[in-house]
Image (cartoon, rainbow, N blue to C red):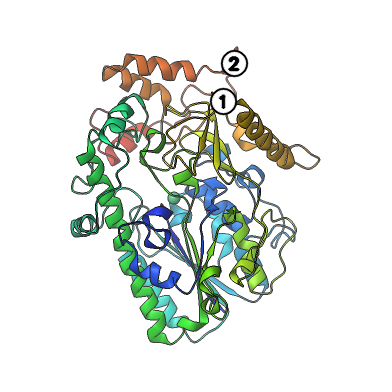
Amino acid sequence: MRVIYVDVDTLRADHTTAYGYHRDTTPNLAALAEKSVVFERYYCSDSPCLPSRTALTSGQFGITNGVIGHFGEAARFRLDSGHGPHPQRPLLGQRLQQGGYYTAAVSMFAERHRAYHFLGNFRESIRATDQLNDEQAGEVNAVALDWIRRHAGEDDWYLHLTYWDPHTPYLAPTEYAERAAALGPAPAWPDQATIEAHAEVYGPRSALDLHYFVGPRDSSTPDTMPDAIRDRADFEKLINGFDGAILYWDEHFGHLLRTLEELGIADQTAIIVSADHGEAFGENGQYAEHGLASEPIQRVPLVVYWPGLTDRLPEAARRDNSLLYHIDLAPTICDLLDIPVPEGWQGTSFADAIRGEEIASREYLVLGHGAHSYQRAVRTRDHLYIRTFHPGAFRAEWEQCFDVTNDPHLTHDLLPESPELGARMRSLLAEWTWTYTGGPGALPDPMMTTLHIGPTYYNDPARYVAHLRATGREHLADDLEARLRAVPGATRVSWHAPDDPWPPGRHAALARRFTVKEPHT
Ligand SMILES: [Zn+2]
C-alpha cells in the first residue's frame, strides 16, 4: 500500500465541510470524505506543534516521551541509546521501515521546531523551500507532487506532507478571504457583547493584544488579519482570513488528489488527513492561537481513506463518534499494514473502525498543552475540565469545566454549581497522571519539573505585565502578577531560574523580525 499522511498545521475540524461547517471551505476534502471514515471525536493528546507531532510519531504521551512544550527541558525528547530503533518504542516511521516501507517527508517542521528526533521517522526528508516559516501549499506541492510522480510506480511507501496555510499569518492571496466570505456569513459567535467582554481577558493573542509577541505589533497582513478584535467587523475579517487560508489549502489538496488520479494510483494510495492541533477563535478569550488545552485546539480532524476498505463501507459506517487520541493512529496504521504494534506505544489501534466494525470508545481523554500556558484537560463524552498549572502571560483560569455538548463555545463554568463533577474530573486527571508517572520506571512529568520556568518562549510574563501597565490596564497587570505568585512561599533558586532565561540578543532579534513597535530592552 502507498500511504500519504496529510498534516495541515492549525486545521480546525469544525471549519471544514466534512465536519459540517456551513461555509464550503474544503470541497476536495469533502469529496474524499465520501469514501472515507470521518472521526468526529479525535484529539491530539498534546498540543501544540512540537508536542503533537512528537506524540503522534513516538506513539507516546508527552508526559512519557518528554516533550510537552516548545522550549528547553519541556521540549527534550527522551531518546534511548543504541544503534537502532528501540524495540519497544520505535518511531512510527522506524516501525514502518522495519515492515518494509520506504518512508519520506516533505516538511519543514523538524527545522522550524528543532524537532530533530522527527527526522528519525524518515529515510528521506525534504524541505520544499529554504524558509523556516510561512511556506505555502503551492510550494509544498511543487516538491511533493514531483516526489509522488517519481515513486508512483513503486509500492509500499509512506509519505508525510506538512502544510501550513491555516497557521497565522494568513498569507493566501486576499481573493481567498473574499471567496470564503462569499460562502456564507461568519460564525455568529462571538457576538459584539462577548467581544467587548473579552477586553478583560489579557494575554498574547487575546482580543486587544492580537499580535503581541515580545512587544505590541500591528498586523503584518492587514488584508486578512485585523490589528485587534474590537468588534464583529474585526472578527469577521479574521475568520475570513482563516477560512480563506483553508480554502487555499484545499484547492492544493485537490491538485494532489488529481495527480494520484492521473498517475493511476488513486485506488492504491491510502490518504490520511489530519492536523497537529486546531485554533481558538474567541473560546476562553483567545483568538487565532493554539495556546490552551481547550476544545477547539485539542480536537483535530481525521479523515481516513483506505482503498479496499473505506470505499466499500455503508454510509452509516463512515462517521465514528468514539473518543480517540491521535497517539492511537500509529498502532492503527501498523494494524492496517499487518505490522506488529510495539509494546511501548501507549495508543490503541482503531483499525476496526476503518474496516467498518464497532470499536470501544475511551471513557475519557487527558489532553495537555505546554507552549503558551501549561494546562491539562479531561475530556469525557460531554464535558471538558481544564486545569491550569502555569498561565504563561494569559488570563487562564486555574480550573474550569464546561458542558461542551450544550455549550460549545465554553462560556459557562460548571464547577461552582457542580462540585461532584469537579471531583470526578480531578480524580480522572490524577488517575491518568499516576498511571504514567507514579510507578517503577517512570520519569517525572516534564510539565511539573519545568513549572519554575514555565512556558517562556512565546511570552515573557514580566514584560507583558509592563505592557499592561503601559496601556492603562493596571488591574489586569495586578491580576497576572498575583497568578504568577500562586504557590505560597515558592522561591526562585538561582540554579533553576535565571532572572532571564532568554539568551542575550534574543528579544532584540525577535523584535526586529516581528516588527515590534516599542521593543523592550
Ligand atoms: Zn502547529
Q: Which residue is mark 2?
A: 490
Residue occupying image coordinates x 23% and y 31%? 517
Q: Which residue is mark 1?
A: 452
Question: Tag 1, which secondary structure?
Answer: loop
Q: Quadrant of the N terminus?
A: bottom right
Residue 339 picture quarter:
bottom right
Residue occupying image coordinates x 63% and y 48%? 61
Residue occupying image coordinates x 37% and y 80%? 259
Q: Position of residue 150 (x, y in %)?
A: 44, 82
Q: CB atoms at circles 1 and 2 under 8 Å apart?
A: yes
Mark 1 / mark 2, whichever is N-terminal: 1
Q: Which amino acid type is marked by label 2? A: Ala
Q: Position of residue 410 (x, y in %)?
A: 44, 37
Q: Which amino acid type is marked by label 1? A: His
Question: Tag 2, which secondary structure?
Answer: loop
On screen, 247 above or below 425?
A: below
